[in-house]
Image (cartoon, grey):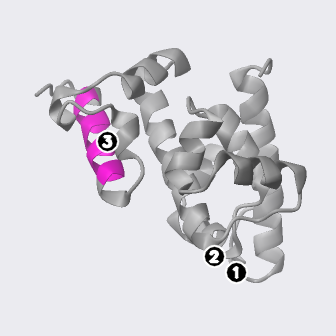
Amino acid sequence: MNTTKNDVEGKLNKAISALAKQIRQKKYYETLKESITYSDFLSNKMLIIAVIRQGVPYSLFELIQDYTPFSERDWASFLDVSTKSLQRYRIDRNHTFKSSHSEKIIAIAEVTQIGMDVFGDIDKLRLWFETPNFALGNLQPSELLKDAYGKEMVVNELVRINHGIFV
């Protein structure tokens, strides 16, 4: 895609603000402030729960997908759906993911955000996700993102790297 990281972040901020407004109107989360950023969203566990329960709309997923270093094939694997299903969802712009898929989408978004904080560059983060890691059993970190335990291991390793603790 030809858009820059800042363009995607701006679109993510707008999409999150719009979604937060919907949630506020449905009385899920009345104390939510008017304008919320993507970063605010990822640090607000109660809002994340509300979004998971409501379901992530495909339009937000598409922006998150553009922000992460993962391909459509990777996302299909993480969500345990076929790439054809993702392509059908793209055509049906009104598709909303069920809560189990929404939870995984947000989990991958959180890992990406942590990784960006550590590496500061999407290409460096992509390389890290694709390189076998001794501390992770010589698996590629991206291979572990299919379940909650693997995600936790990847996050823990990113935190260790951020603190200069190498195994």
Disc 3 residue crowd, few under 14, some 14–19, many 20+, Cα 10 Å: many
Q: Residue 142's x, y, as percent? A: 40, 36
Residue contact between numbered discs 2 and 1, judged by CB atoms under 8 Å: yes
Q: Residue 66's x, y, as percent? A: 69, 33
Judge whether residue 157 is colored magenta.
yes
Give the residue displayed 40% in from the left and 24% down from the top: 130
**Three-letter amino acid code of the residue under disc 1:** Tyr
Element assignment for label 2: helix
Q: Specify the segment rendered in magenta.
A: 150-161
Element assignment for label 3: helix
Q: Which residue does the numbered mark 3 point to in the structure image?
A: 154
**Three-letter amino acid code of the residue under disc 3:** Val
Taking the image as shown, residue 93 lies to the left or right of residue 122, namely right
Q: Which residue does the numbered mark 1 point to in the structure image?
A: 28
Q: Please tell me which of labels 3 and 1 falls first in the chain.
A: 1
**Can residue 35 be seen from the camera position used here?**
no
Give the residue displayed 43% in from the left and 38% down from the top: 114
Q: Residue 126's x, y, as percent? A: 48, 23
Q: Is residue 64 above or below residue 48?
A: above
Assign the C terminus to one quadrant of the image: top left
**Three-letter amino acid code of the residue under disc 2:** Arg
Q: Residue 79's x, y, as percent? A: 55, 55
* Mark number displayed over residue 57: none
**Can residue 119 be seen from the camera position used here?**
yes
Q: Is residue 42 above or below residue 143?
A: below
In the rendered image, the residue lying farthest to the left is 167
Q: For the residues marked 2 and 3, what is the alpha-carbon distance in whole angstroms?
A: 25 Å
* Mark number displayed over residue 53: 2
